Image (cartoon, coloured by chain):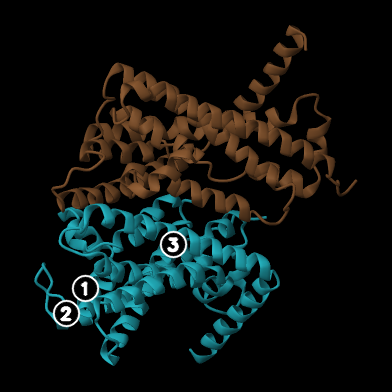
Chain colours: A cyan, B brown
Amino acid sequence: MAAALRLYLKYTLVSIRSQMQYRASFIMLSAGQFIATATEFVALWALFDRFGAIAGWTLPEVALFYGLGNVSFALAEGMARGFDLFANLVKRGDFDRILLRPRSTLLQIGASEFQLMRIGRLSQGLAVLIWGVLTLGLGWSAWRIVLILWAILCGAAMFAGLFVLKATTAFWATESLEMWNAVTYGGVETAQYPLTLYEDWFRKFFTYVIPLAAVTYFPALAILGKPDPLGTSLAFQTIIPVAGLAFLGLSALIWQVGVHHYHSTGS
Amino acid sequence: MSTQALASSWRAYRAVMSARLREALQYRTAAIAGMVTQVFWGLIRLMIFRAFYASTAAAQPMTLAETTDYLWLVQALLLLMPWRHDDEIQNMIRTGNVAYELVKPTDLYLLWFARILGGRAALLLLRLPLIYSVAALFFGLRLPASPAAAGAFALSVLAAFLLSSAISTLMTISLMWTVTGDGLSRLTSTLATVLSGSVIPLPLFPDSFQTVLNVLPFRGLMDIPFRLYSGNIPLVDRPRELAFQLAWALGLMLLGRFALQRGLRRLVLQGG
């Protein structure tokens, strides 16, 4: 385990170093992503400017949902980018190379590219999160900071799980992968607002099928210290993000099934 | 140019366009997957806007029904967005194969413009009918406000199509200056995404934003056609809005053609 972690770190450092060879390009890409996500937040602000509130939630409150969702997603995107691009590896038959090496495939794919430019979305989400906490006057107690970090960790694991599942489907079909965007990008979009405003079927989907609610909605309530309109307890809201970690674990198991199914395209 | 020469060059552009169209039509599975994704996305957006409208009693510049039409048309016609430059042309510029393009006895700008237009038309033709009918049957997209609105909408979509292709072609040409960096084209897509109305309908932006939004070309991509569709733009303003779109399309085409000429003059071909 420790050896695997060391290897992952090494891969990551190599990846970062290679991206730093093109420093100007890295800065441009990160700034570009920051601007892209920031303009989305401007649009969100514009809606609050016009409508005042959404289903009884104010902008600073929604900022917390927005921040948690985007920071988790950016972390997952940065770390699991290899899975996002995995279909190309399968199409070219290059997965064979990875199978030959005496290390876990998950580790190798996960570490194949650490996308540093995701720092654009990450910093933007973090800024919005901090702004929300400050505006609401919640204060930075140790408990709150731990809660925020816990939610981000579990959220990143959940999104990483989605990327692993997306890559797993590439073992069977490579043309329909865009559908996963509905739950990855669609997931961040959904997470940006309190779950209560969505329709019942949709809420259930993102609670029971994909545990998005467990890693954003419930912990956000605990951080806000706001009673849940759906009636859950604080203890539940604090513990339930663990479902994100479990989801990643389950995805890893399904991945193994896919690996056994793999037939090379040859060369 | 004689009429005969004109006819023959038109045939050339048409051939390029239709070849690109047929190429893109090969990817049907991908198109269906894309459609499902977009309908799902559209539903998320719709639920969010419904919740916003339910939160206020104040009159808005657009009714919820008009916003619903607008949101679905964004999904159905999402490919009107000038996402980015043309990958193949980018490769040609990078590898030096662009030399072969120069040998062709056609106007290079129009050749590239036709390629970009054709590739986009195919993708659009695949997705538009599917998303439109699903949204109209199940998710609250209404028919056009009137036959006149439908006509204005159709014309306006065509104009948006020219405008979008003009922007994409210009972004592609910009690659002649920055071979590695597609920074400019990324930035343009980012701006276009918000400023066209694809994130939120432009009338819902604060009133103080409207002056700026009104003069930029991006509203010609989505905002104008979609508001014509629902009747949010009054009858008398239709010719003016169409003229706005066409003027920007023509202006950007001329700018692109000029930039291409400048770019070719400083072009250094690699390889042999």
The residue identified by callout 1 is A218
Disc 3 element: helix
The residue identified by callout 3 is A38
Q: Residue furthest right?
A: B272
Spatial CA distance of label 2 from label 3 is: 32 Å
Q: Quadrant of the N terminus of chain B?
A: top right
Which one is in front in this view, the residue at disc 3 or the one at disc 1? 3
The mark nearer the N terminus, 2 or 1, is 1
Q: Percent from the top left, x then y, of residue B201?
A: 34, 43
**The disc numbered 3 marks a residue on which chain?**
A
Cβ atoms at labels 2 and 3 below 8 Å apart: no
Whether labels 2 and 3 share one chain: yes
Q: Percent from the top left, x then y, of residue B197?
A: 39, 43
- Foreground residue among B48 and A13: B48
Cβ atoms at labels 2 and 1 below 8 Å apart: yes
Q: Percent from the top left, x then y, of residue B144?
A: 29, 25
Query: Going 74% across and 50% down the picture, which residue do you hit?
Result: B177
The residue carrying pointer 1 sits among few (fewer than 14), some (14 to 19) or many (20 or more) residues within 10 Å by Cα, namely many
The residue identified by callout 2 is A236
Whether labels 3 and 1 share one chain: yes
Spatial CA distance of label 3 from label 1 is: 25 Å
Disc 2 element: helix
The residue carrying pointer 2 sits among few (fewer than 14), some (14 to 19) or many (20 or more) residues within 10 Å by Cα, namely few
Q: Percent from the top left, x then y, of residue A37?
A: 44, 61
The mark nearer the N terminus, 3 or 1, is 3
Spatial CA distance of label 2 from label 1 is: 8 Å
The mark nearer the N terminus, 2 or 3, is 3
Query: Going 48% across and 66% down the picture, which residue do you hit?
Result: A259
Name the kind of residue labelled 3 in the image.
Answer: Ala
